[in-house]
Structures are given as structure tokens and as C-alpha cells.
Amino acid sequence: GLGEHRAKAERMFSLMDGFLKNDPISLQKDILHHVEYTVARSRFSFDDFEAYQALSHTIRDRLIERWHDTHIFFKRTKPKRLYFLSLEFLMGRSLSNSVINLGIQDQCAEALNQLGFEFEVVAEQEGDAALGNGGLARFSACQMDSLATLDYPAWGYGLRYEYGLFRQIIVDGFQHEQPDYWLNFGNPWEIARIHVTYEVKFYGTVEEVEMNGDKQKIWIPGETVEAVAYDNPIPGYGTRNTINLRLWAAKPSSKFDLEAYNTGDYINSVVNRQRAETISNVLYPDDRSHQGKELRLKQQYFFVSASLQDIMRRFKEEHTNFDELPEKVALHLNDTHPSLSIAEVMRMLVDEEHLNWNKAWDIVCKIFSFTTHTMVAEGLEKIPVDLLGSLLPRHLEILYEINHHFMEELKERIGLDYSRLSQMSIVEEGAVKSIRMANLSIVCSHTVNGVSKLHLETLKTKTFKDFYGLWPEKFQCKTNGVTQRRWIVVSNPSLRDLISKWLGTEAWIRDPDILSGLRDHVDNADFHLEWKMVKRINKMRLAEYIEAMSGVKVSLDAMFDVQVKRIHEYKRQLLNIFGIIHRYNCLKNMDKDSRRKVVPRVCIIGGKAAPGYEMAKKIIKLCHAVAEKINNDTDIGDLLKLVFIPDYNVSVAELVMPGADLSQHLSTAGNEASGTGNMKFLMNGCLLLATEDGSTVEIIEEIGADNLFLFGAKVDEVADLRENGVSNLAPLQNASPLKVPLQFVRILRMVRDGYFGHKDYFKTLCDSVEAANDYYLLGTDFMSYLEAQAAADKTFVNQEKWTRMSILSVAGSGRFSSDRTIQDYAESTWKINPCRCPL
Ligand code: BZD
């Protein structure tokens, strides 16, 4: 009967490597098919972009096949699943990554070649998917790649913003923001699931009703919006497993609103309906501050509600008893942005499934885990109670009740210590009464993760000290990582080949610890030669890009010195610029002979400032003003260049990191929770110049302090320096040369006095250092910074030493693979097992 039929079909299927073939001829046929029927161009005449579209659809077909097989396999084996909830994913481009993970890169290149196209050129046609801000969002993307590669039964959930992170354009040295309408040319990497939709409700009132003799609260919502699923297949490397990133888009509810139409104002009622779509329209571009805006809260709940309906539906298809939930479902909160999930699961279990409160609470506390990416308490998310109460009245009640139970428990544990009680409360009383999302997440999660050892230490001893005292076992360290698939294999093919040649294996692409084998060759002269050659090739690519973007010609013999990341005062791009001004001053004062001994530098800075962040925008302008001065000074020539790379994003990073000799990570110690850029540079054999902050501390453990350039105050010195060291800055004239070096004072004066123009505009920037008591310790760390820079110069002259350090950096980078991070999460936090789809 049917079963026999199915068994036969399965037997047949297992004989095939998928339905679609991956040899160059088959790929070529499929590409031409898509040119003609998907792109609707003639197969005899199409351009690079159309070739990109056709190839992408060809790859997409193969992804869909694997996606189906994976999910059928998951359905059959019913493993515990991880749901990774994040409001941001910075995926970048997908084509190269997909063909590499599918293992069909050479075949695709050949197929294209025979059609007269070049793979690299075609791949560059793709725009970035930039549905996130910075480190947190790119880390989410790296984790998805590792989850798929390590065969974990995981789903990612997010929002399908129609406008991703703004495009940065520079006009006259100033940042301007332009909307990133990234779906303009279609997106072949997503699959619209028009039948996977859920209603999401907002506003309304809470009423008490009688149910089976019991009083029960129910929510009578006032507005309904529909969530539509868009699936993005995520292929693993060296496995058939292809998991799903499901992104939700908002659409007007399909419910026919008779009343609205019968009032006669047809046009306005259509327009009003359409407003629903605004919920998933645009990504908030702030990577630190939270503004308590209604639309942001709506986005959060829209995301949470749709995802949880989907997750619960899947659970209920396979199970009948909610006691099984913790054995089958792990919900991970990527920062506090999805933390309304906690209240939503309680509401579903209590109001809809009619579990009693304690039972529901017991379940909820077993399914959530939480990672915070924030270092300082001021960065923690708070939602005004007024806002929450009007948008989600029932959820606010639930949050109050959760807090009530928590406060009762706390009183039993610590007594009537009111100051501590009020600090730990989920509800913050005060001028604006609000919900503390971090406290909520800690109370309800079985595990609270920090993103580096140093970050966890700060959480335990400062940010969440009281919670640590209460539940020490909850607090765990899961140091961040990045995927070597994208950050070496995709972005640095020459290095990939070199590594594989000298290790005699490609196994490091799945097992990054193998990279340590490079240490065996660290003194081999042939290896050194090839290593330097690879760097040179990548510097050439970067130099071409720089010239195309900024018109500045740079010398390949110069040291390429890079700082790319979001612009923030704490990340101290200003320290970098002051260092460059110092270098310029020194060069100006040198005689010809001394100049000949100087190591030429190309200083590269890139990154976006949040649109409302004035100080960050001024830093960008200052960078341009200084660049203009230096780059046009014929005295200086190739000895020093400064370029700002506009619109820094994932694909720019893929070009910049392989081509960098030195990279800078300058955060004032105690401010960078982890940092992940440092890990990407490390993997690309770029030496780090850094403070002992975030994950850099662990990089030092791995490669040794001798193999990078360290400087600056350490975490435990910062508080003291802020109190005692900096008061000397104001007034500057009296600055003690011990605490604040004269060079620093002079540079500040140059900017203040208009040496780089725009005197008035830069005033507040200078004030932020002087009048604000140099909160980020630029003056304090300046000498130490210059010393580290001098050490880098000195080492660069000794190319053998430099190359050794570079090799040892890559050899020690295995620990910073997101594969390690994910395995650790899987085993100790999520308790999930690999579930490998048979080939
Ligand atoms: O997260 C960053 C931290 O600053 C880094 O130190 C860390 O390496 C990464 C990954 O853990 N945090 C962010 O990127 N945060 C945001 O982007 C963000 C976005 C919206 C709201 C608040 C913060």
C-alpha cells in the first residue's frame, strides 16, 4: 500500500545526490533555464546582473531541495529544537557563501566561464542584506552558519525589514543617510510562504470572564495585523543540512473589515489598512540607545507573537502535553529585544491553554536562555509602562504579576532590603515608570550569558551583581566567535588555498582547531614567502577599491592600518585620528634623512554613525578634514595617507580584512562587551593593535602578548583614572604633562583653533574630551597608544618577525570560530544534539 510506496520512493531517493545535478553542464542548463524563464531575458543575450539572478535561482533550487530533506528529517526524528530569536541579522551577500557551503564553487565557476562570465564579477552584482546594525547582528549571522554546519536542529526567527540599515553617503565630509530599499531588484534567497501567516493583535482592553466557575482574564484586542513568513535557507558546510531563517513581514489583515468599508470612505479605509505594513518597514539604526518609541515596541511584539504562534503550532503538531515543552523547545533571547516572548508564552499558556499560573511559570523558566551584548547599565533596554499598557494591556498585567511573584520570593531570600528590592525589581518606579527588560530576562531565563570572560566578570560584579548573588549558577560565559567559512573561505580564497596546502587538508573549514597546525611551519622560509605573497594580492585588491572609492592612490609597500566598526565615542576613533595628526606633525618636523627611515602608512577608517548621534558624526567629519590636509600635502607624499571608506558593510569588510596589515581596537577598557572584528582580522593574518578589553583578553591568552600590540589602561584601572587622573585636563593650560601629554594638548588645540577648518563645528567634539573630563580617557592613554604604534612601525621593518606574528595569529584563531561558540551553547545551555540529515 501507501507505506510500501513511500519506502520505495525513499530508497530511490537515497540513491541520488539530490534531484538536481551539480556538474557544470547541468548547472549551465539550469542557469540558462532561469535566464529565459525566471529572469525573462534571452538566453543568447544577458548581462552580469542577469547572470547573477539566474545563477542565484539555480542555487536557490538546490537549497530548497536540501531544506526540504532537512525538515522532513527533523520532523521524523523530532529532536529538541532551538529557536534563535533575534531582531537583527546582518547576512551580507549569499551567493558565494552558498556555493561554497554546497561544495559546488568550481562547478559554478566553470559553468559561468563557458557562458562567458566570471564568477567573481557575477557575485559582486549582489547587494547586501543588512537587516541589522553591527556586531550583534553579524554575530547572529555567524551563529546561523555554525548551527547549520554542526547539524543542529535550529531555526532562526527575525524581521523582514523592507529598509535595512541606511546607506551612508559622504557629502563634503559629512555623513548623510539614504534609505536601503534592498528588495528593489528582488531577493532570490527568500521564499515567500504566503500560506504561513498569523494574526498579530494590538491595543484593546482586558476583561474578566467566568470560565468553568473560575474568573479568567482575557484580552480583547483592538487592532489586527497579519504576519507573513519569508524563509531564508541557511546551508551548512560539508553537510546536507540546510536550516531556516524565518523572517516576518507585516501585511494588512485579510479579515474583511465591513464597518470601515460601509462608512463610505473607501479610499481612506484602504489607506488605513495599508498602514499595517509600516511595522516591518524599517530597521532602527541605533546600536546602543533605546528611545521608547511605539513603533519599535510594535516591531518587537509583532516579531514575538508571530514567531511564538509558529513555534507552538509546530510543538502541538508533535506533542499534546505542555510538560514536554522544556524537553523539546529551547528559546534563545538574543539580547532583550525579543524579551516580550516571556510574557507572551505566559499569556498563551495561561489564557489560551488554561494552565494554572505556577505550572506555566515552571515551564517558562525551563525554556528561555538569554545573552546580553551590553556592557554598561545605561545601555539596558527599558519600556515605559504607559506605552506598554496601551499597546499590550494584558502583557503589562502579566509582567506585573511576574514581578509580584518575584518580589515575594526575593523578600524570603534577602529580607526587607528595600533598596536592593527596588534595584532588582522588573518594574522601575521613577519619573517614567518602566519595565526593565534585562531584569525580566534574567529572572525568567535558566541561563544568562556574557559574550566574553571579561564581560561576564563585569556582569557578575557590577551590572547584575545582585542577581549574581541570588543565582550564581545562571551566569555563564560564551565567548563570541565568527565563522571561518565567510571570514576566510569566502573572503580570502588565496589564504584558504595557502592554509590548506601547508596543513595538507581542508578539514579546518569544519574543524577550526586544526589551524594550530600552522605553528609547525612558522619558521619555514618558503611558507613565509607565500604568506607575504597572499597578503600582497589582498592589499592590491583593497588598494584598487580605495582608489575607486576615494580617488586616493596608495602604495602597496605602506602598512595598511585599518579601523572599521560602528562609530562610537567609546570605540575611540578619535584617538586614532589624534594619533594620525601626531604622525603628521612628526613628519612635518623631520629632515629628509629621517623621513627616509619612516614606515609609510595608509590609515583606513570606516563605519556608520547612528543618524542622531552628533558626536559620532563629528568624528566622521574630522576624519575627512584631516585626510584632506594630509593627502594634499606634497611634503608628505606616500609616507602618510588617510582614507575614509564610505558605507562600511559586510561585503566591504570581506575586502578590507584580508588586505589589512594592522587593525585597531581601541575601546576604553571595560566598554566593549566582546568585539568580533578583532577575530576576523586575526583569521586574516592581520596584527592587532588593541586595548585589553572584551575578547582581546582571550586572544592574548591564545596567541601570547608578544604577538600583538597592546596599550592603554586596564579594566581595573579605569575607574580610578576617571576619578583622579583626568581632572588635570581642565583647564588644559595647567595640564600635568605626566597625566596628559603635551603632544595631546597640542593636537586638541590644533583642532580647536581651526587648523583643519570647521572651527565652530568641532568645538563640542573638543569639549567632549576637555569639558567632559575626558570620560573615555583619550589623554590618559595617548602616550601608551603612541608607544604601541611605534612598536608596530619597528616590527614592520622586520618583515620576518611580522610574518611570524601574522602566521601565529591565524594559527591561534581557531578558538574564535563561532563553531566553538555554538557547540558550547548547544551542549551547556540549549541541551540540543546534532541531527544530521542522511546524504
Ligand atoms: O555585540 C555588540 C557589542 O557592542 C560587541 O562588543 C559584541 O561583540 C557584539 C556581539 O556580541 N552590540 C551590538 O552590536 N549591539 C547592537 O547592535 C544593538 C542594536 C540594537 C539595540 C541595542 C544594541
Image (cartoon, rainbow, N blue to C red):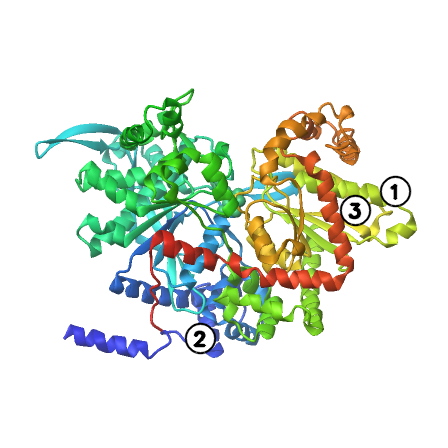
Label 3 belongs to which residue? 631
Kind of residue sitting beneath label 1: Asn
Residue 133 appears in view = no
Residue 589, numbered circle: 1
Q: Earlier in the sequence, mark 2 or mark 3?
A: 2
Q: Residue sitting at 45 percent across and 46 percent down?
A: 88
Q: Earlier in the sequence, mark 3 or mark 1?
A: 1
Cβ at disc 1 under 8 Å from ligand 1: no
Residue 22, numbered circle: 2
Report crowding for label 2: few under 14, some 14 to 19, many 20 or more residues within 10 A (C-alpha): many
Q: Earlier in the sequence, mark 1 or mark 2?
A: 2
500, above or below 191, in the image: below
Q: Residue sitting at 71 percent across and 27 percent down?
A: 729
Mark-to-mark CA distance, 1 and 2: 63 Å
Horizontal side, residue 218 vs residue 139: left or right: left
The answer to which image quadrant residue 78 occupies is bottom left
Tell me the quadrant of the picture where the N terminus can be found.
bottom left
The answer to which image quadrant residue 217 occupies is top left
Mark-to-mark CA distance, 3 and 1: 17 Å
Residue 536 position in % (x across, y down):
71, 64
738, above or below 791, in the image: above
Q: Nearer the viewer, residue 217 or 365?
A: 365
Kind of residue sitting beneath label 2: Asn
632, above or below 244, in the image: above
Horizontal side, residue 196 vs residue 660: left or right: left
Residue 494 position in % (x across, y down):
62, 68
